[in-house]
Each structure stands twice: as C-alpha cells, then as structure tokens.
Amino acid sequence: MERDDREIQIEAGLGKPRRVRKGVRLTPRPAGIVWAPGVGFSPDGKCHITMNNGNNNISMAKGPTNPNAKGGKKGSASNTNVNNPEAAYTRKYDKNRIEVLRLLLAACCDPLFSPADEYNPLASRWMAVAVAADAPNAPCLFYSLLNTVISFDPSNSSFGGVPYSNKFASDTHVKLVELSAQVLCVLLDCGLSGDPVPCVNRYDEPVVRVSYAYKNGFNIFRVMLARINSGKDLATLYRGFVRLLRNTFESKNTLLPSSQSRLECYQELLILLWKTLEENPLFLDFILTRCDVCELVVPLCYLMYTSRKDSAQVGLVHICTFILLKLSGERSFGVSLNRPFRTKLPCDLPLFSGSHADLISITLHKIIVNGSYRLVSLYSCFLTIVSNFSPYWRSMSLVSSVKLVNLFELFSSPKFLYSGEKAYRHLALLLEIFNNIIQYQYNGNQHLVYAIVRRKDSFGRLASLTLPKAIHQCQKQFPSSERPEYDADAADAAQVAALSIQDVDEHGNPIDDEDDATSTTNGRDTATSSTTVSGTGECFVPTEAWLTELRASLPLETVSRLLQHLVPVVDDMCDRKNGVVDEIEILEVFKDITMVGLLPVPHAIVIRKYQPNQYTSIWFTAFMWGVVFLRSQKPPIFDGQCIELFQVAGEDK
C-alpha cells in the first residue's frame, strides 16, 4: 500500500516528505472524537491519519466519551476510542452538532457584509482565528466534517434502503450532512492555498513547518486537504463524491416514484469538489489515472442540462463548467471520455449511441441553443472544453456531428457574426475542434466529415466573405433602429468577472501566441471592449481591419482542403446513381479514403488550461455564500438587508 502511495505522489510531481526538526503536528488528539469513519480510517477501525488538538465546544458536540477509562476524566474522550472511530459515529448527537455548526456559520459570516470589489480573503479576524495553526481541534473538526459528508449514502440513509422509508425517518442527519458541507466550504475559502508537499518530524508524523504555519494567510484546513495523499483516502473521497452527485438523477430513476430521498446540497458538494481539485494535485491525478472519471461527468452534465433554463441556477451551471474546464486541461481526461455512455438519465436528452464525449457535446449544444441568456458568458468556455478533448475523440456519434456543425452554422449566421466585434471567436474554436478531429482522428469520424460535406456552403460563404458583403449583411440584419438580441460584446458576458485560460501543448509546456485571438478568454478585457460598443448605443459595423483579423483568426485551411477533395467524390457518386445515394454508402467510401498528403501538415495540439485569479476567487466566494444564505432560512441566520457581497432580492408578496 505504501508503495502504491509513493507511486501516486511521484506521478503528481511531489517528492519525498521533507524532514523538519520542529513543526505543528497534524495528528488527532484524540482521534476517537471524529464523527464518522472515512478518510483517515482503515476498514479495521484503526486511525492512520494525523490531526491536531481541540476546540472544546466542538468536542462536546461530538459526543461519545468513556468516563470509566483509567486515568480519564468524566466527560472527555479517552485514548481507548482512538482505535474505535466507529464508536464516535452515533446520530443521537446530531442535533447538538447541527446547533454548533450553525453557530460556526454565524461566527464566520463577515465576508457576507463586505462589498465584492473590496473583499479581502485575509482581512477577517474571525476566520483567521478559526483556521490558524493553533486552532483548537482543527484536524478533528476537518475530518469530522469531511467524513460526515462523503460517508453519507442517500440511498441507504434510513431503514436499510427500504423504499419510502425516508418519508417516515427524521431528516436530522441529512441536515447535519448539509451543514457539514457548508461549514467545510466556508473554512476552505479563506486564506492562502495549502502546500501539498508533505513534511514529517523525527517521529515520522505529518507536520507543518513552524515558519510556514505562522505566516499571514495560513489556513490549516487547506493544508490538510492538500496533504491527503493515501491512495485509499483518495479513493474514499472520489467514491463519496460520485455516490452523492449521482443521487441527483438516481433518485428520479427509481422504479417506484419518489421512493428514494434526493440530497439537496449538491451545490455545496460541487464547491467542495472544486476546492479539492484545486488544492490537492494528487486527487486530480488519481481520479484521471486510477478511477473512471466518467462517473463524475454524468451528474455534471445532468445538472447542467436540467438547469439550463432556470435563471436561479446560473451559478450551478457556471461551477459545473469550471469543473469540466479544469478536467479537460488534462490529456487523460480526453482519452477517458471515449468510454461508451449507457446511463439512462431522467431528462429529455436526445437519444444517441456514443461515448461520454458525445454526452458533453450534446449537453453544451443544448445549453447554447436552448438555455438562459445569462449563460452567454460561458459559450467560449463550452467550446474550449470540447476543443481540449477533441484531439482524442476516436468516434463521434451522428447526433454530436450534426449538432456541432449546426453550431457552426448558427455562429456564422449574420445574427451572431455581426453581434459584436469579437463574435467570431466562437467560430475559431469550432474550426479548431473540426481540425483536431480531421487531423488526428479522421478514421472513425466519418459522421463529422459527412456533416461538414453536407454543409459545405456555410464554410464557403465564410471563406469568401468580403467587406461590402459583410457590411450589407450587417445592415440588413441590424437596421440602425435595432439592437442585436445576442450581443457578443455585452457587459453581461463578463458576469463571471474574469476567466484566465493558458495555452499549453500536449506535454504541458506554455505556448506564446500573441496573434491568436482565441488563446485567452479574459472577462475583464471583454467588459472593457463592450463599453466601447454597447456603451455608446451604436451597433457594430464591419471594417477592413476587422475582416483582416477575422481571416487571420479562423483556421479554415484544413476544412477547405477536405472539402476540395471529398465534394467531387460525393458529386461523382450522385451522378453515377442519378442522385439516389444511400448515406451508408457515402460513409463507407469516406472510411476507405485516406487524407494523408492532402491535408496541411498537422498542427500542434493546443490545450487551454484554467488559471486561477482573484476575479474567479471572488466569484466562488460570492457563489458559495449565496448558497449558504439561501439554505439557511429556516430559521434564518443572516440579515438579508445588511448583506453587501451580493444583492438579495426579496419575493413580492
């Protein structure tokens, strides 16, 4: 087991643990007061994770004690519980724990009352004390909250999973799970990122260097999350996230309607998943190389698909998009998406026979053509996700092929192309998707090739676009008295504040390309350019400089070469058979044709990786506290009229 853990750390680029003479220990004292088994506990009940010393209020809320232990004081947990963490896992103390967690939320809520543009994650004195290196019982609290969340099984939460048993059982423990997720997200949100490189003392106990532990912005919870490095613990974390997120659709897929309870804290779970991916490099590498990451993709796509029209769920779609964008920056993710998709989802998803890559592309297409207008800011992110895994897409389904080419027609139409100065950036990403598949995965993707051949006129019109034609189309589509319904440069497109995306090659090396207009998506730059267009009340008008930039940004050469060779082949087939040609025959011909020597030299694979920045950090903080605020209304903990981090709109009576 230790050898496997060592291999995991080497794969993630972490070296051997550093030895220090003195440090803050991360061992539980005592481990028996941890609320639930899970991360840090082996199946035999022995504790192998190190935590720290204690917070008296939290310890008393955790419950089980052994007053009869030798040398032990009445009312305190003794060391006999260290080897029996299951003894501490009793639900008769859940109500006490709920009240303590509500108190913690109230004590740590000062970010709610700071304006977003003035928010400083290091300014809160309450949070600084709560996450300090000497915070009482911080490790016990961390593992209690984490294990309470990931060990919960909604399908077996009461009476052994008997159908409808949730209707008669108390929801106290469910409430505890929800609050545990909220408090854990809050504690992981402040301060600086944790150092994932392990340190040990002379007794081989995990510690934090004293000089690092007492730096301004230190957060012991983020350090503990970053240093979960056991393969067993990482697998427990992953299985917990998968089990809880899959409940979102499995609870609706039962034979008996509403027979299984549905966990409502899925937004908190997504925040916790995001923070784990961001803080722990071992976790990201582990789920991509040693787990079936497609198990996470399915609930993410389901939540995005079912929430696409609900303006109240815009934040949910955003965080699902961020997670997919984070995963798509890794080559292993693109390769894993070729696994066949066979799950039946309780939604109106189009029927298709294909892989999980098809599931993502169909979901994102549906959001673009039939989603909330407030999701316009994510269109580039959607296409970036597909572009990242497209070089590894072995076989695209017919449905995905048609929908991607439909998107090209949509974004190349005058309504979209002339809606803003940078509206063509979507076309550049779509062309990159087509080029990646044609250059690297031509065999097996005849459906996409055939869809491109059928819509050859759309590509031809774009390639032959001239300035007079562009001006005429723009004026015809948008008369001077009308504003475009879809404004690619609108300020709403910067709703997420700023998304930094870095171009890297297949091996992770940065790529510098100043002329590539699609290489970086920055919400702040988008907001600045939008004011020059929409702020003056004038519609966009094509110029010679704009047309030159468009031609330089759209990689049409590969598709043009493909059409030059294949269109005459299809026309010849139609002439020989009097225009009656079966689609299957054309696909078989495409399968036998080789494009070697006919296409341009294959371009380098470019992967766009998410880069954290202060603007997205503020967005995550506001989203997290918005979720906590809305879920803490019965009874209410916070005064909505005093909140400044986001705007609270009351319902009309």
Image (cartoon, rainbow, N blue to C red):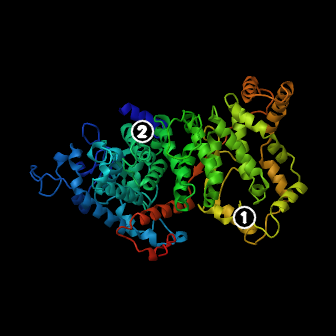
- Residue type at mark 2 is Lys
Residue that appears at 42% across and 68% down:
124
Res. 26 in view: no
Q: Tag 1's secondary structure?
A: helix
Number of marks in the rendered image = 2
How far is mark 2 from mark 1, CA to CA?
Answer: 48 Å
In the image, which disc is placed on residue 16? 2
Q: Position of residue 259 (x, y in %)?
A: 36, 47
Could you tell me which quadrant the N terminus lies in? top left
Residue that appears at 60% across and 41% down:
508
Q: Tag 2's secondary structure?
A: loop
Q: Residues within 10 Å of mark 1 (few under 14, many from 20)?
A: some
Nearer to us in this view, 206 or 570 = 570
Nearer to us in this view, 178 or 287 = 178
Q: Residues within 10 Å of mark 2 (few under 14, many from 20)?
A: few
- Residue type at mark 1 is Ser
Q: Position of residue 134 (x, y in %)?
A: 31, 59
Res. 156 in view: yes
Q: Position of residue 577 (x, y in %)?
A: 83, 25
Cβ atoms under marks 2 and 1 closer than 8 Å: no
Q: Is residue 216 above or below residue 65?
A: below
Q: Is residue 21 above or below residue 9?
A: below
In the image, which disc is placed on residue 529? 1
Nearer to us in this view, 345 or 593 = 345
In this rendering, position of residue 615 left or right of residue 548 = left
Q: Name the front one of labels 2 and 1.
A: 1
